[in-house]
Image: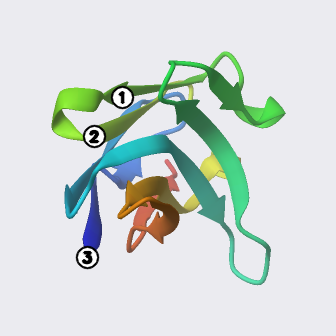
Amino acid sequence: QVQLVESGGGLVQPGGSLRLSCAASGSIFSINDMGWYRQAPGKERDLVAQIYSDGDTVYADSVKGRFTISRDNAKNTVYLQMNSLNPEDTTVYYCNAHIKQRGRMYGYWGQGTQVTVSS
């Protein structure tokens, strides 16, 4: 079994910064990609940023230039540096990973971490 444990959410003022972390643990052969999604109440879960094993990244248009995704392969950890936060970024953020186990790829989700941007 694999667990994704997120940390780093909280309350920040508009224009401020937060750094989210997500560490994968358990029976892991390799990690293909890791990413962050966010989901507002009553809405679909949308991609925020994703990073692949070769370092390629994908960002939602709404966060380009403000958020940066990175990963530490040795620690099986992905980070999301969020700068210039605004109230529209307020929601729950979820970590996602596609992990190879026993020759097959499986998708996993973290439990979610709340980010609130408010003065």
Judging depth in this view, the residue of 105 and 102 nearest the camera is: 102
Contact flag, marks 1 and 2 (Cβ < 8 Å) = yes
Q: Residues within 10 Å of mark 2 (few under 14, many from 20)?
A: some
Mark 2 secondary-structure assignment: strand
Amino acid type, residue under disc 3 in the picture: Gln
Q: Which callout, 2 or 3, points to the residue nearer the camera?
A: 3
Please report whichever mark, 2 or 3, sits nearer to the chain's N-terminal start: 3
Q: Residue at x 53, y 45 (%)?
A: 35
**Outermost residue toward the bottom?**
42
Mark 1–mark 3 Cα distance, whole angstroms, equals 21 Å
Q: Residues within 10 Å of mark 1 (few under 14, many from 20)?
A: many
Q: Which mark is residue 77?
A: 2
Specify the quadrant of the image occupied by residue 41. Answer: bottom right
Mark 2–mark 3 Cα distance, whole angstroms, equals 17 Å
Q: Residue at x 54, y 31 (%)?
A: 52
Q: Residue at x 35, y 64 (%)?
A: 102
Mark 1–mark 2 Cα distance, whole angstroms, equals 6 Å
Report the residue marked by disc 1: 71
